Image: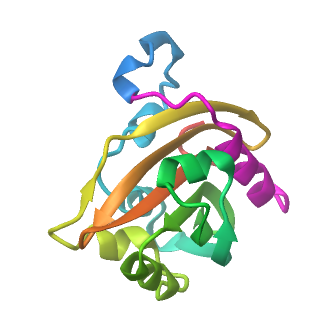
């Protein structure tokens, strides 16, 4: 599982056909994973409900970074502050998340998280809203499906892409 971060990041970056959930054919939808993919609320809360006290965040990278061409198109910025984490149940990573902050307040929010999940603080704010989810099927080892959305916390956008990993997860 050492290459999981590299593989999941590649899966997010390789996803080129982003679609709204409602236009994905029912026959193409992964039955067990679908409720997780279309979760509009806090994915952190949903993962914690399944994992309990074993839920944890493993920070893989955090800092200023050049964005991929697709990310630059999505965010409108060539560089930004990026935080990559695994959302884990015990030692098993379930989700690889890549969050991009393009504003000063959003960057400060990410910098201050440490190993705390973004979802805990973000969804406690009454002003938090999420733009429509987009989903892509990817052909990368370690993850077959990924989703992305923009989360607005206190008016600042956070661009979030989450790959649902294979191996020991509730959606398999």
Q: Is residue 166 visible?
A: no
Q: Which residue is depicted at the point 40% across and 56% down?
A: 43
Q: Is residue 3 magenta?
A: yes
Q: Is residue 123 left or right of residue 149?
A: left
Which of the pair 169/104 is nearer the observer? 104
**Residue found at the very far right of the displayed protein:** 2
Q: Residue 31, image x and y in percent?
A: 48, 25
Where 154 sits versus 1, above or below?
A: below
Q: Residue 162, image x and y in percent?
A: 54, 51
Where 168 sits versus 122, above or below?
A: above
Q: Is residue 19 visible?
A: yes
Location of the C terminus by quadrant is top right
Which of the pair 23/141 is nearer the observer? 23
Q: Residue 129, image x and y in percent?
A: 24, 57
Q: Residue 74, image x and y in percent?
A: 50, 48
Number of numbered discs visible in the structure rendering: 0
Q: Which residue is depicted at the point 58% across and 53% down?
A: 72
Q: Is residue 72 magenta?
A: no
- Specify start and end residues of the magenta stretch as a single range: 1-20
Question: To which quarter of the image does residue 152 belong?
Answer: bottom left
């Amino acid at each position: 599982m050492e290459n999981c971060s590299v593989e999941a990041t590649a899966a997010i970056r390789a996803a080129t056909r982003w679609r709204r959930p409602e236009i994905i054919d029912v026959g193409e939808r992964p039955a067990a994973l679908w409720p997780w993919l279309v979760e509009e609320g806090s994915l952190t809360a949903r993962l914690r409900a399944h994992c309990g006290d074993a839920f944890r965040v493993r920070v893989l990278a955090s800092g200023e970074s050049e964005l991929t061409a697709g990310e630059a198109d999505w965010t409108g910025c060539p560089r930004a502050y990026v935080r990559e984490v695994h959302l884990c149940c015990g030692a098993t990573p379930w989700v690889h998340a890549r969050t991009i902050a393009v504003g000063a307040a959003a960057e400060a929010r990410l910098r201050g998280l440490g190993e705390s999940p973004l979802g805990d603080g973000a969804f406690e704010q009454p002003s938090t809203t999420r733009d429509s989810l987009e989903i892509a099927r990817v052909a990368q080892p370690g993850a077959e499906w990924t989703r992305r959305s923009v989360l607005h916390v206190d008016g600042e956008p956070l661009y979030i892409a989450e790959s649902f990993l294979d191996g020991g997860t509730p959606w398999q």
